[in-house]
Image (tube, rainbow, N blue to C red):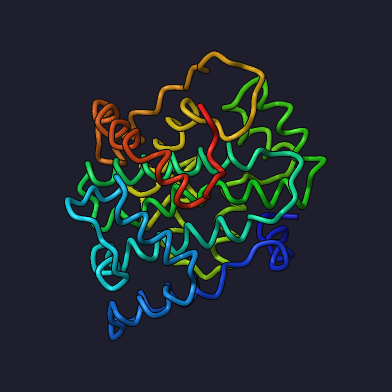
Amino acid sequence: MDARTLVAGTHDLASLPGACLRVMELADDPKASAADLATVIAHDPGLAARLLKLVNSAYYALRNPVDNLDVAVRVCGTEALRSLALATGAVSAFADIPNDLVDMGAFWNASVHCGLLVRALGRIARLPQPERLFAAGLLHAVGQIVMYNRMPAESRAVLDILHKDLHARADAERRIFGFTYAETSAALLESWRLPASLVEPVACHLEPATAVAFRQDAALLHIAREVTLLVEPGIKTDAREPRPSPAIAPAAWAQAQLVQGVLPSALEQVDTQWFEVIDILNPGGSLAY
């Protein structure tokens, strides 16, 4: 079995809500107006509420509050709106899946942190449309949920290894599954018909040098994921002390077109947004610290 075969049987497990799909469709339509998008969002009260909360959060840091969906859509822009729709759609898609192997609060905490960090790094690198990086960071590990649910025995064996070494996931998955969560995540995003600008960075973030069309995005996501492992590993572990991270290879920094010295600034941006964004995307689901 490979990642695509595993994902092929997940349509009953995780599919994006209709409003999310319609928002993404309109975001790709040059003829669609802000009013068109606002109308679709208004028919999904949950999405509408999240949009207004996000626009008024530290994520945008506006001086004046926004209480109108049309204005909120204009403030966000289509790329950010697509990311928000994907984010809320993904959280909704997995909300009711029973899972004994993973703490979903910890999982989304890590995913949001990674999304915010890669977005911040993309901004520092002056990448065009860095909003797309938030979606890539948020969704980079959704394949883990598929693997936990479809192959629980094998997943438990991987988790047993991770309790001793968080950085051993990719090697353990290759040995036990024959493929990694990154491949599974990318296959799931492909099944959702998401663009290559999201799929390739997710597929290649463990080995960013393998990316072809979106090499900088893949390197930025690689860096964000490695740093996030230190801050929020995404799983419950017995260890309470910070785990040492392997040095991010100079080649990855070069591919990202950044230097390591930008990390404090990027992390400062994340710290002002992290818990607020978690609570917007997954109300009541954040962990208490």
Residue sitting at the far top:
241
Instruction: Tell me where residue 208 sits by quadrant.
Output: top left
Residue sitting at the far bottom:
31
Residue drawn where x is 61% and y is 36% of the image: 170
Residue drawn where x is 49% and y is 72% of the image: 44
Q: Is residue 52 above or below residue 224?
A: below
Number of numbered discs on residues: 0
Give residue 87's position: percent from left, percent from top: 47, 57
Between 42 and 82, the one lying in front of the other is 42
Give residue 215's position: percent from left, percent from top: 36, 50
Q: Is residue 257 left or right of residue 196?
A: left
Q: Is residue 207 left or right of residue 256?
A: right
Give residue 82's position: percent from left, percent from top: 39, 65
Residue sitting at the far left:
63
Instruction: Tell me where residue 18 sits by quadrant.
Output: bottom right
Quadrant in which the N terminus is drawn: bottom right
Between 105 and 110, the one lying in front of the other is 105
Residue drawn where x is 53% and y is 39% of the image: 286
Give residue 70's position: percent from left, percent from top: 28, 73
Residue drawn where x is 49% and y is 64% of the image: 46
